[in-house]
Amino acid sequence: MDSNEPMLLLSSRIGQIGDLGLDLLWRFLHIVVSLFHIVSGIFEAIQSYAISLGLIQKYSSVDIEKLRCLAVVLDIEVARDVAKVVELLQWLKTIGVKQVGLFDSQGLLKKSKDMILEMVPGSTLLQETGEKDISPDRKEGIAIEFISSSDNKEAVVKAANILLKRHLKTSHPEKDEGNNVFTESHLNEALRVVGENVHVPDLMLVYGPVRSHLGFPAWRLRYTEIVHMGSLKYMRYGSLLKAIHKFTGVRQNYGV
Amino acid sequence: MLSLLSCFLSLLSFLVHSCIRPWTQAKISLKDEKEIDEGTSYVAGEEETPKGLLREQMPRHVAVIMDGNRRWAERAGLLTSQGHEAGAERLIEFAELCFKLGIETVSAFAFSTENWGRHKIEVNCLMSLFQRYLKSKIHFFQSEEIRVSVIGNLEKIPESLLGTIKETEEATKRYKKKHLILAIDYSGRFDILHACKSIVKKSQQGLIREEDVDQTLFERELLTKCTEFPSPDLLIRTSGEQRISNFLLWQLAYTELFFSPVLWPDFDKDRVIEALVSYQSRERRFGCRI
């Protein structure tokens, strides 16, 4: 019995040292991971500035033709900083983007659209036009669409109501299940009647703390690439160019 | 390269932590059993909440786009069908883990309307896989009390699979706490159009008037009406693609999007926890100012 006590004591001491060792290892690992994230953040910032200065050859030419329509989703807090929004639009115009849909859920940007259009040289309000109807001014400038949550579910409900009324006016609505009235092209047409744009954005950039499209018109989002860009306040031209460049390299199978 | 290194370090930290915690808890139990914290007691059927996660902040509904089976099979030198098999197995493990962590609803995008454009052999293989898995897992779903629902067009799928789907849904319809929704031959746009047609039918039957049609009524006609929480809190898409590909278009308005570079058959427990940690660290505002 007496000989067990020193052994138990030794075992306990070893255990305590082991616990301490593991605890230190865990904290060390935490520091390593945190340092890694700090370093990678610094690296990204440096890379972004290098891209902005045109020092990285890869990003000096972007195949912008692949990006026919860009959507920019702004968190409600971020959308209040109109100056930053204007700066972003100017950058997009410099890159060569022709069509931008600006979305914020509450419609704050819609209320400031005249000011924004005035502050971005060469910008026009996007109208629903046919492909051939592009004026020479439009080719150089940027067409901007202002979107809010009311253009999402409310618009689809209104469009659905239009189709419902159309269906009820057919000669035998009770026999028809609506297969000839409720098709994708009919809903597209009804959305246009309601005043909605049905252009499908190829790429969506989300600015804000949340990785969500915040209620952007769902009908248009089928195959849209979604990239979270972080804070608008700390946006960088290099990061923007990098995101667009990355998109041009994406290959979609469309489910096939 | 940097993202790979980041993933490796995160994984390493999880592994070390997984080793430390059981080791130190074993030491505690040897030292003094009275010091065991009752708050960490294990309840049968529940997964102990991993460190870094809060049980009360778990999403109620998690959706997943299971992308990457074919690439996984190619990299492993296997057939595409084996990739899909691995993907199916991974889905069962994923759903099981989610339910044990307290997540009530799991939706999985198993087959999209666009997938009909794939090679006929692959499509037939997938249909056969769905049938085999559903049939073989009925008892499992019953023993785990998981309700299974299948949403989608379902008009083109084989009769035998349709029969198995109905059998599975019928056998599990009484379970309330855990819900697995499989989207087969599903398209977000079809879902919206289907809701329109459903409203037409009800209008013809005199059940609703034109002026009753609003967002709430519309949402109740979508295919996700089978669940109390049709809008996912978190959407996970694997294999590095960053789009929603026509999945739950209406329902994803305020859903947190988590895009993982990992291929679906490799999306294991650590990856799930990574996604949930990322979800819990974000501030959701649902479009409003807080």
Image (spheres, coloured by chain):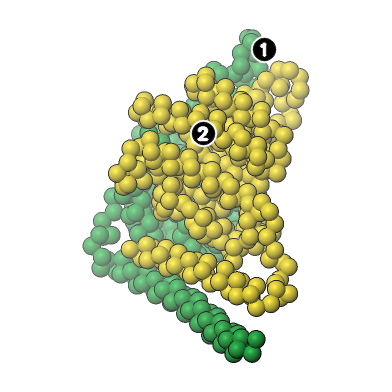
Chain colours: A green, B yellow
Asked if residue B163 shows in the view, the reply is yes
Q: Quadrant of residue B22?
A: bottom right
**Quarter of the image where the C terminus of chain A is located:** top left
Provide residue B235's location: percent of width, then percent of height. 54, 49
Task: State whether residue A256 is above or below residue A25.
Answer: above
Give whichever of A128, B262 is nearer the camera: B262
User: As displayed, is residue B30 above or below residue B103?
Assistant: below
Residue at mark 2: chain: B
Tell me what residue is drawn at x 60 percent, y 55 percent.
Answer: A108
Residue drawn at (46%, 28%) of the image = B127
In the image: residue B262, left or right of residue B32: left
Q: Secondary structure at mark 2?
A: helix
C-beta proximity under 8 Å, tags 1 and 2: no
Which of the labelled discs sits on residue A174, or is there none?
A: 1
Q: Nearer the viewer, residue A15 or B250?
A: A15
Residue at the outermost front position: A1
Q: Position of residue B163 (x, y in %)?
A: 57, 22
Residue type at mark 1: give it.
Glu
* Furthest-left residue in this view: A57
Mark 1 to mark 2: distance in Å?
40 Å
Residue for point 61% across, 20% down: A166
Residue A18, numbered circle: none
Residue at x 33%, y 37% (from the top left corner): B79
Which residue is tagged 2?
A: B133
